[in-house]
Image (cartoon, rainbow, N blue to C red):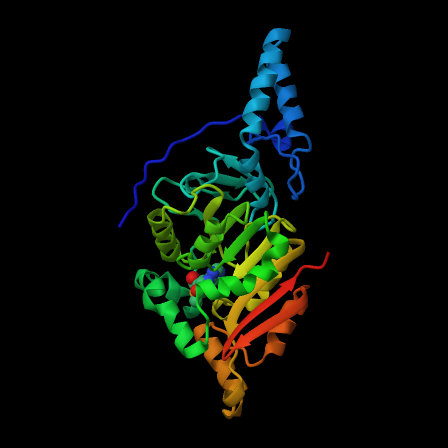
Amino acid sequence: MMRIKKRRRRSGPWIESPMAASGGNVSTPVSANSNSRCGGFFKHPPLMLMLKSHRNYSSPAATATNIIRASTNSLLQVNEVKVQKLLACPICHDMLVWNGDPVFSVDSTPMSSLKCTTCKKAYSGNQTQTHLDLTLTNQYMPPSSELFRLPLVSFLYERGWRQAFSIWGGFPGPEKEFEMMKDYLKPAIGGSIIDASCASGLFSRLFAKTGLFSLVVALDFSESMLNQCYDFIKQDQNISQENLILVRADIARLPFASSSIDAVHAGAALHCWPSPSAGVAEISRILRPGGVFVATTYIVDGPYSFIPFLSPIRANIGQISGSHIYLSDRELKDLCSSCGLVDYTCVRNRRFVMISARKPN
Ligand SMILES: C[S@@+](CC[C@H](N)C(=O)[O-])C[C@H]1O[C@@H](n2cnc3c(N)ncnc32)[C@H](O)[C@@H]1O
């Protein structure tokens, strides 16, 4: 079913990027925000805006009026530019410039069109999408990923599928898992969190409801999961539509600037990724120094370790399905440390495991 949503468009001050100044024609919005952790595309945006105003108006009175108007407008957009600086080209990790409405919320972000300043790759949003699509292509993934793109699976995910993890795997369930991870997430409070492979957004919604984070990104590769996530968000009156965005991306090609994100959560997802090491390496790249990674998955050990030929069986299952079965906690620790993360911890409940690690300061 096609979604057609009515959205209000807002306009804001726009300024030529350094690229445009040197002959290109790309423009991007500016703001007064100077506290962002990300590297600045504009070192002093308000000042640049004032200089632009000054070029356009010769009368001192008109110049003063425009300086005030521009500064007021740019102050109104503090949040928006912060998010913009977090998003980056999934190919070259360089800044994306926005052609259109630079407003960030559940409804406005999917309409944005973006272009990389370096590799020129463009990403077009439209009125009918529920999410911003920053995947490179619509390429076919292994079955462990493709399964979740089926609309029926997305529909069933929070209607019995996820609950089954508790029965066979010992997953405590979203609320308890959220309680368990709160301590790990403390250094990220007030910052940005990505719910990587969010599916229908069970944790993204919890993160948004707490108001603990300045930005929640619900990210998944599956369009149908993100559509379901959008529907659940719309049904819940307690979720703010601001500072929550839905992004479609591949975990191995994350569209965020390096060292820009405070925390990444990946619930029940590591074992579904085509390459867990490519995913965790990307997470390590985008986390800011001291940023936190929390994930849950399952470990097949204990009595299962006595199954003969378990390692070759696992390799064959992995090759066919694309999924990854962990046989010990050591493998998860190695995965984190090989991707540059430190201070690994793990909590077990039968086959369920919650791990955490952080990017070194
Ligand atoms: C079992 S669900 C986990 C959902 C949720 N986080 C939870 O805790 O229940 C696994 C999710 O991983 C996503 N996924 C699989 N491959 C992916 C990839 N390459 N990039 C991003 N997400 C992927 C699937 O679309 C699916 O929504």
Measuring from the top left, give residue 305's x and y in whole percent: 53, 88
Q: Nearer the viewer, residue 15 or 70?
A: 70
Q: Is residue 300 left or right of residue 36?
A: left
Q: Is residue 14 visible?
A: no
Depicted 171 relative to depicted 254: above or below: below
Q: Is residue 178 visible?
A: yes
* Residue at the image position 71 percent from the left and 59 percent from the top: 360
Q: Which residue is at the far left?
A: 1
Measuring from the top left, give residue 158's x and y in whole percent: 35, 63
Measuring from the top left, give residue 66's x and y in whole percent: 58, 15
- Asked which quadrant contains residue 226, the reply is bottom left
* Residue at the image position 64 percent from the left and 8 percent from the top: 60
Q: Which residue is at the far right?
A: 361
* Residue at the image position 57 percent from the left and 49 percent from the top: 192
Numbered circles on residues, count: 0
Q: Is residue 94 left or right of residue 107?
A: right
- Asked which quadrant contains residue 220, the reply is bottom left
Depicted 192 relative to depicted 48: above or below: below
Measuring from the top left, give residue 277's x and y in whole percent: 59, 67
Q: Quadrant of ligand 1?
A: bottom left
Q: Nearer the viewer, residue 19 or 341?
A: 341
Q: Nearer the viewer, residue 261 or 16?
A: 261
Considering the image in quadrants, where does the C terminus appear? bottom right
Depicted 355 relative to depicted 233: above or below: below
